[in-house]
Image (cartoon, rainbow, N blue to C red):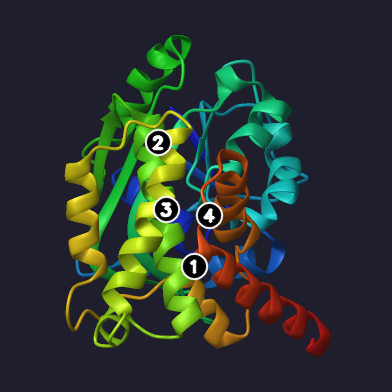
Amino acid sequence: MKTLVLGAGATGGYFGGRLAAAGRDVTFLVRPERRRQIQENGLIVKSPSGDLRLKVKTVSDTEVAPEYGVVLLTCKAYDLDSAMNSIAPAMGPRTTVIPLINGLRHIGILDDRFGPDRVVGGLSYISVQIEPNGEILHLGDAHAMVIGARMASQTPALRGIAEDFRDAGFTFRISESIERELWEKFCFLSTLASITCLMRGTIGDIVATRDGVAVMAETLDDCIAVARKRGAGIDESWRERTLVALIKEGSPLTSSMLRDVELGSRIEIEQIVGDMLRRAEVVGVAAPWLKAAYCHLQTYENRRKREV
């Protein structure tokens, strides 16, 4: 199966690089500067699971053709419109899109553009970043990809993808309940991003305060209430496990959104915090900490745009 990876940034470069190292047929759709970097130095991954330096195939947006079985979409959520324009020429009659994008908002947008039968559910669990020199740094042990059918017609395509993606140097799993798992990650990310950005600290910093545990728990419970009102069957055991991680004493965990704020970068505010807040308002969940975080992050974006 031929796989096209949009970009060779942190997430796409890591998973695409692992697939290429395992001998799979992978091509990266990249901008000219990133293409030059890869041609000169190779695709470089530094990871506890093993470093890579690979010669890989690349194409530009003027060269891509509808010859791929899979398109792995790993852009930032705010770049979705330009990403869809880039991959559109690659969409053949049987091409499946796997979006590894934060939040849920992107799914309906991709459905409208390419048809819901072409867009499966996708999740990644990895902490990874790209350095200015193009090296991809894997920051932990987790490197998992989960995909699942959103409708029965997608099952045959998923079987073919599973054959290609399994045993490719990262953890891979087919989910039988991808909608619930998408909501679970959305709840986790919305809570983590909202509170670490609002408080500008790690989980350990936050829970060491008088009210930190309560604030984190209340925010998670508001997100779960939204998910349940929207039909996601999130059970109490998931809540308990997730809350343990979100209130762990001394935890250095923070959100990638906070790291972006500290760098003065653009953030996925509308696709994570803003989208969860809007969904909360529709179903009647008050979510005061989400509202405070959204106001805080909007203020950050307004100031960032003014100072650019």
Q: Residue at x 63, y 15 (%)?
A: 93
Q: Residue 131, percent across and down?
A: 48, 79
Q: Disc 4 to disc 3, how far (Cα)?
A: 8 Å
Please tell me whether residue 243 is drawn above or below residue 120 in the rendered image: below
Q: Do the residues labelled 4 and 3 touch (CB within 8 Å)?
A: yes
Quarter placement of the C terminus:
bottom right
Q: Name the residue under label 3.
A: 222
Comparing 36 with 11, the one in front is: 11
Q: Mark 4 points at which residue?
A: 286
Comparing labels 2 and 4, the label whose residue is closer to the camera: 4
| The disc label shown at residue 289, or none | 1
Q: Residue 53, percent across and down?
A: 36, 66
Please tell me whether residue 99 is drawn above or below residue 205 in the rendered image: above
Q: Which quarter of the figure has residue 140?
A: bottom left
Dot 1: within a 10 Å radius of its alpha carbon, few (fewer than 14), some, or many (20 or more) residues?
A: many
Query: Number of numbered discs present?
Result: 4
Q: Residue 157, percent across and down?
A: 43, 18
Comparing labels 1 and 4, the label whose residue is closer to the camera: 4
Q: What element carries label 2?
A: helix
What amino acid type is highlighted by mark number 4? Answer: Ala
Q: Mark 2 points at which residue?
A: 228
